[in-house]
Amino acid sequence: LVALLGFFLFRPLRTKINERGRIVSETIQRARDQEAEAAQLRAQWQERMRTIEQQAEEIILAAQREAQAKSADLLREARVRLDRLTEEMRADLERYRNEVVVLHYDEILDTVMVLAGHVVQSVTTRRTHDDLVTNFCASIYQLPQTDVEEYRQIMAGRVPIAFVSTPVALSPEQIRTLEDTLSSLVDQRVALQMTTDPSLVAGIQVRLGDKLIENSIRQQLVRIRGRVQRDLVARIEEI
C-alpha cells in the first residue's frame, strides 16, 4: 500500500521536476551553443588578423627593398597603405563583433531571464507572495486622483468585475481586502474573477476593463531585462 501511495503521489511531482530539469538543460545547452558560435567567429577573425599581419609584413619588406632602390617616398606610401589596411581590418572586426552581439543579445537575455526565473521561483516563499499582494493593495490607495478618475471612467457602465491572476490561491482575508480595495478605486462594488498563473512566480495581476495593474516577480524580471537591453544597446552605439 505504501509503495502504491508513493507511486501515485510522487510520480507527478517527479515528472514535473524532470520536465523542469529538461527545460533548464535545454536552455543551458542553447546558451552553450551560442557561446560556441561566438568563439568560432572570434577564431575566424583571429585567423584573418594573422593573415593580414603576414600581408602587412610582406608589404613592408617589399616597400623597404623598393625604397632602397628608388626613394624613401615609396616607403612612406607603403606605410600609408599599411595603416589604411590595418584601420579597415579594425573597422571590419568591430562591425562583425557588433553584428554578432545584436544578432544574439535577445536570445542571450531571454536565456538569462529564464534561468533567473527558475532560480527565483525555487527560493520564493509564500511570505514573498503575501508581501507583494499587500503592497499592491497599499499602492492602489496611493494612486493620484487623476488615475483614480481614469479607472472610474473606464468602469462606468461596465459590469464591475476584476480579473485577478495569482500564482497561488489567495486567502479569504486577502480576497476580502482586495475586493474592498478595488471597490474603493472604482467607487462601486467589484466582484473578483480569480485565475491561477504560476508564471507570475509571486504577486498579483489585475485587469479592470482594458487597464492592467501588476505587482509580481515576473514584472520585476521583465523590467530588469528591459534595463539590461537598453544598457547593452547604448554600449554598442558608443563603440
Image (cartoon, rainbow, N blue to C red):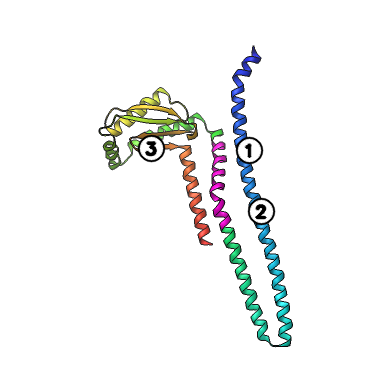
The residue that disc 3 covers is: 213
Find out whether the residues at labels 2 and 3 contact each other: C-beta distance under 8 Å.
no
Tell me residue 62's x, y (percent).
72, 79
Tell me residue 37's x, y (percent).
64, 51
Amino acid on which disc 2 is placed:
Ala
Placement of 98 over or under 111, stated as above or below: below
Residue 33 belongs to magenta span: no
Q: Secondary structure at mark 2?
A: helix
The residue that disc 2 covers is: 39
At horizontal 50% and vertical 46% (from top left) the residue drawn is 225
Is 162 displayed left or right of 156 in the figure?
Answer: right
Mark 1 or 3: the one toward you: 1
| Rendering quarter of residue 216 | top left
The label number, if any, that marks residue 61 in the structure image: none
The label number, if any, that marks residue 25 in the structure image: 1
Q: Secondary structure at mark 3?
A: strand
Amino acid on which disc 3 is placed:
Ile
Question: Is 87 in front, or is 179?
Answer: 87
Task: Tell me which label, 1 or 2, sits earlier in the chain.
Answer: 1
Is 51 displayed left or right of 226 in the figure?
Answer: right
Find out whether the residues at labels 1 and 2 contact each other: C-beta distance under 8 Å.
no
Tell me residue 43's x, y (percent).
68, 57
Q: Secondary structure at mark 1?
A: helix
- Tell me how far mark 1 sits from mark 2, CA to CA: 21 Å
Placement of 56 over or under 20, stated as above or below: below
Mark 2 or 3: the one toward you: 2
Residue stretch in magenta? 99-120
At horizontal 42% and vertical 32% (from top left) the residue drawn is 133
At horizontal 61% and vertical 63% (from top left) the residue drawn is 93
